[in-house]
Amino acid sequence: MAQSLSRKLKHNVEDTLEDVGKVLHRAADELADDAEEAVAQAAVGLRRAAAMLADKTPPAIKSAARKVTDEVKQHPIASTAAALTAAAALISLMAATRKKPPE
């Protein structure tokens, strides 16, 4: 009697766990679908914002950006070094202003 009761309990627990697993699996699928839709909507919005920004950008800025892009493509190592130097200078400047005691 005790064995049959423990078997029934074991089967009930296994069935319940299986049901919980199925529900969690469905919930994860729905969440993944929602996340994919949100990312797709964000990408559309970003694309639209980029197009609007490109439309509003003056021709002189577009020309300068093309020139910079061409220079970077022609001299990638020098461009990287310049960018790293600028980043280091900005970091140093930020660190120096944080260390100043308030006057």
Image (cartoon, rainbow, N blue to C red):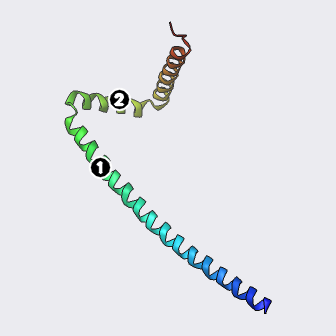
**Residue in front for this viewpoint, 71 or 86:** 86
Q: Write down the residue under mark 2.
A: 68
Q: In this rendering, is residue 30 above or below 54? A: below
Q: Identify the residue at horizontal 51%, vertical 10% (top origin).
A: 102
**Quarter holding residue 57:** top left
Residue 64, horizontal then vertical, whole percent: 28, 27
Q: Regarding mark 2 in the picture, which secondary structure is present there?
A: helix
Q: Identify the residue at horizontal 70%, vertical 84% (top origin).
A: 9
User: Which image quadrant: the N terminus?
Assistant: bottom right
Q: Which mark is residue 45?
A: 1
In this rendering, would 40 be left or right of 79? left
Q: How many marks?
A: 2
Q: Amino acid at mark 1?
A: Gly
Q: Identify the residue at horizontal 48%, vertical 20% (top origin).
A: 90
Residue 76, horizontal then vertical, whole percent: 46, 32
Q: In this rendering, is residue 64 above or below 26? A: above
Q: Nearer the viewer, mark 2 or mark 1?
A: 1
Q: Which mark is residue 93?
A: none
Residue 25, horizontal then vertical, whole percent: 52, 71
Q: In this rendering, is residue 63 above or below 95? A: below
Q: Regarding mark 1 in the picture, which secondary structure is present there?
A: helix
**Residue in front for this viewpoint, 39 or 20:** 20
Label 1, residues with CA under 10 Å away: few <14, some 14-19, many ≥20 = few
